[in-house]
Amino acid sequence: MEKSNNYNNHNETVYNIISNFIKQEIEKREAQGVVIGMSGGIDSSLTAVLAVKALGNQQVFGLILPDSSLTPKTDTKDAIDLVKSLKIKYKVIELNKIKKQIVTSLPKNKMARANLLVRLRMSLLYYYATAMNLLVLGTGDKSEIMLGYFTKYGDGGADLFPIADLYKTEVRSLAQYLGIPVKIIDKKSSARLWKGQTAEGEIGMKYEEIDKILLHIEHNNINGFSKHTKLNENNISKVKSLLEKNEHKQNMPPICKLK
C-alpha cells in the first residue's frame, strides 16, 4: 500500500509541475493555446492529456498527420478516439500525396525521405501555430532526446517540451496514472518512418534497459560504469555510441564567432 501511495504521490507531483509549466509559458508568451501533433502513440497522447488538464480543452488543438503508406490505421483511429474523448478541436491531414509530389524530382534516399515526412509535420504544426497564435507543444521524452532519437527541425522543433525530463518508462507510469488507454501505453514506440519500424527494434534493446543506462550516465560519468551495475556491456557501449554520434543534436548549429 505504501508503495502504491509513493507511486501516486510522485506522479501527482510530476503532473502538477508540468501543468504549471504549460500554464506559465502560455501566459508569458501571450499565446491563445497550444497545437500538438497527435500520432496515436504514448508521448503525444500524454502531452495532449497534460495540456488539456493544464489549459482546458478550448485552448488545445490537435493535428493528426498520417502518411497512409506508412501509418497504421489503428494509430490514426487511436489519435482520433483520444482527441474526441478530450473534446478538443482537431484536423486530420493525409500527407502521402503531399510527400509524393515533393519527392518525385528528388534523389531516392530512404532516410532523407523519412526525415522529410517528419519535417513536413513540423511545418504544418507551425503553420497552424502562426495562424491561430498557438505554441507548438513538443512530444519528445528524455530517452529520445538524450539518445538523439529525433529529427532535427522535425519532431525536434517545438516551442515547449513538457515531457522532455521524463524517461520513457516514466512517461508510461504517468500515462497509466492519468488513465490513458492501455492499448496506447502498451503500443511499441515508433516514429513510423518506414513500415515495421519501431524505436526499440532500431536501437536494439528495451526502454527499460535503455533508461537504466541513461539514468546511470546522467548521474555519473559516461565511462564510470561498475561491473556491479548488472547491465549488458554491449548495450552500454551501444548507448554510449549513440550519445556520442548524436551529440550535435543537443546544441544549436555551431556559430562562427568573429571576436
Image (spheres, rainbow, N blue to C red):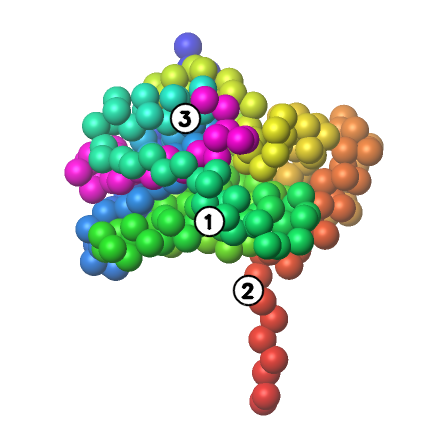
Residue 120's tag is 1
Q: Residue at x 55, y 64 (%)?
A: 252
Asked if residue 34 lies left or right of residue 150, the reply is left
Provide residue 143's location: percent of width, then percent of height: 57, 39
Q: Secondary structure at mark 2?
A: loop
Alpha carbon of mark 3 to alpha carbon of mark 2: how far? 33 Å
Amino acid carrying label 2: it is Met
First of labels 3, 2 by sequence position: 3
Q: Are marks 1 and 3 in contact (CB under 8 Å)?
A: no
Provide residue 235's location: percent of width, then percent of height: 77, 33
Please provide the residue range marked out in magenta. Answer: 51-73
Asked if residue 187 lies left or right of residue 229, the reply is left
Amino acid carrying label 1: it is Leu
Q: Residue at x 48, y 38 (%)?
A: 96
First of labels 1, 3 by sequence position: 3
Alpha carbon of mark 1 to alpha carbon of mark 3: how far? 17 Å
Q: Secondary structure at mark 1?
A: helix
Which of the two residues, 202 or 166, is positioned nearer the viewer here?
202
Q: Is residue 238 magenta?
A: no
Residue 76's tag is 3
Asked if residue 79 lies left or right of residue 3, the reply is left
Question: Residue reaching furthest top?
Answer: 1
Provide residue 214's location: percent of width, then percent of height: 64, 39
Amino acid carrying label 3: it is Thr
What residue sits right under mark 2 in the picture? 252
Q: Secondary structure at mark 3?
A: helix
Provide residue 223's location: percent of width, then percent of height: 77, 47
Mark 3: few, some, or many residues within 10 Å (few <14, many ≥20)?
Answer: many
Q: Is residue 26 visible?
A: no
Q: Are marks 3 and 2 in contact (CB under 8 Å)?
A: no
Which of the two residues, 217 or 205, is positioned nearer the viewer here?
205
